Amino acid sequence: MTDATLVTSASLAASETLESPARRAWRRLVRRKGAVLGLAVIAVFILLAIFAPLIAPYDPVATSWSLVRKPPSAQHWFGTDDLGRDVLVRVMFGARASLLAGVIAVSIALAVGVPLGLLAGYRGGFIDALIGRITDAMLACPFLILAIALAAFLGPSLGNAMIAIGVSATPIFIRLTRGQVMSVKVEDYVEAARAMGNPRWRIALVHILPNILPALLVQATLSIAAAIIAEAALSFLGLGQQPPAPSWGSMLNAAQRFLTSAPWMAIWPGLAIFLIVLSFNLVGDGLRDALDPKAR
């Protein structure tokens, strides 16, 4: 019995050793109930956003004065707003703006922040000092305040809101990337690659970048949640998605005048923001644990 147990343990250890890092991380991730729940909720919102034009029973911008502020019913599950528009349909179409803004804004931050962080962390010297001072100046201003200022400067539109949020999130990725590069570039395998005469760009892209991707992936997941909140805030202030196009933030703006007489106008878009942001944070926490090399 003892010999069989030892053989089984040895087999499991061998299989874990041969398992790819991505597969191992996925196996650890799906063990975490919070992360799985978050992935399921995100998948539902993505499907709603993609198939909204096909499954929505009403036009999200069509008004009807005979249906103004109707409570939830069999015909309108989430009720209607102050212009007679179906709230459920607008929440579904609003998911498109929020998810698109979150993904594109974080993509902008990654596209700008990671190369600058690699450059600053690997080269050091004057370049590191210059990028560091610019990053410190941007981080001195709160993320949302900076995004509002940039969006106001660029003009009200969803595209400009994405750019403003992406630029505001860039210093986070610059600092994270720089710190990761500073710790990785002194490893033995990087020194060996340098001793073999590899050019700096190859060392940075082939030997350093792949080893800092887990930290970037976790931060990107958490930043999407922050970007969705920022997009809702900008749309609430009239600097994001412009009416009559649906957005969760603009829906909350319209609902604030009817919180007592038609509370469902605020409840559903607010609940949607809460669920999607919570889900991305749960997935981010799960990824942090799953990608931890010390995890078992």
Image (spheres, rainbow, N blue to C red):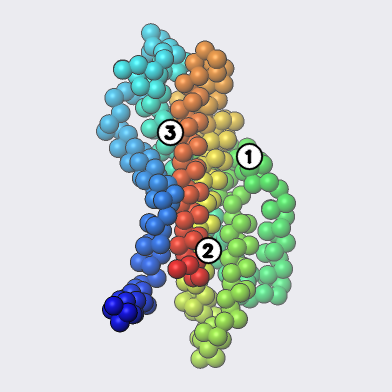
Vertical order, 83 against 216 (above or below):
above
Report, in whole angstroms, how far the alpha carbon at label 2 lies from the one at label 3. Answer: 30 Å
Task: Give the amino acid at mark 2.
Answer: Ala
Q: How many marks?
A: 3
Mark 1 or 2: the one toward you? 2
Task: Give the amino acid at mark 1.
Answer: Ile
- Secondary structure under badge 1? helix
Q: Residues within 10 Å of mark 3 (few under 14, many from 20)?
A: many
Q: Residues within 10 Å of mark 1 (few under 14, many from 20)?
A: many
Q: Which mark is residue 269?
A: none
x and y, in percent, of residue 76 in the image: 35, 19
Q: Residue at x 46, y 58 (%)?
A: 287
Residue bearing the label numbered 2 = 215
**Circle 3/circle 1 CB separation < 8 Å:** no
Residue that protrudes farthest toward the top in the picture: 66
Q: Please say whether residue 207 is visible from this viewpoint.
A: yes
Vertical order, 78 against 7 (above or below):
above
Residue bearing the label numbered 3 = 94
Report, in whole angstroms, how far the alpha carbon at label 3 lies from the one at label 1. Answer: 20 Å
Could you tell which of marks 3 and 1 lies nearer the N-terminus? 3
x and y, in percent, of residue 252 in the image: 53, 26
Report, in whole angstroms, how far the alpha carbon at label 1 lies from the one at label 2. Answer: 27 Å
Mark 2 or 3: the one toward you? 2
x and y, in percent, of residue 227 in the image: 53, 45
Q: Which mark is residue 148?
A: 1
Q: Give the side of residue 240 with respect to residue 61, left or right.
A: right
Q: Give the side of residue 26 with respect to residue 111, left or right.
A: left
Task: Give the amino acid at mark 3.
Answer: Gly
Q: Please say whether residue 106 is visible from this viewpoint.
A: no
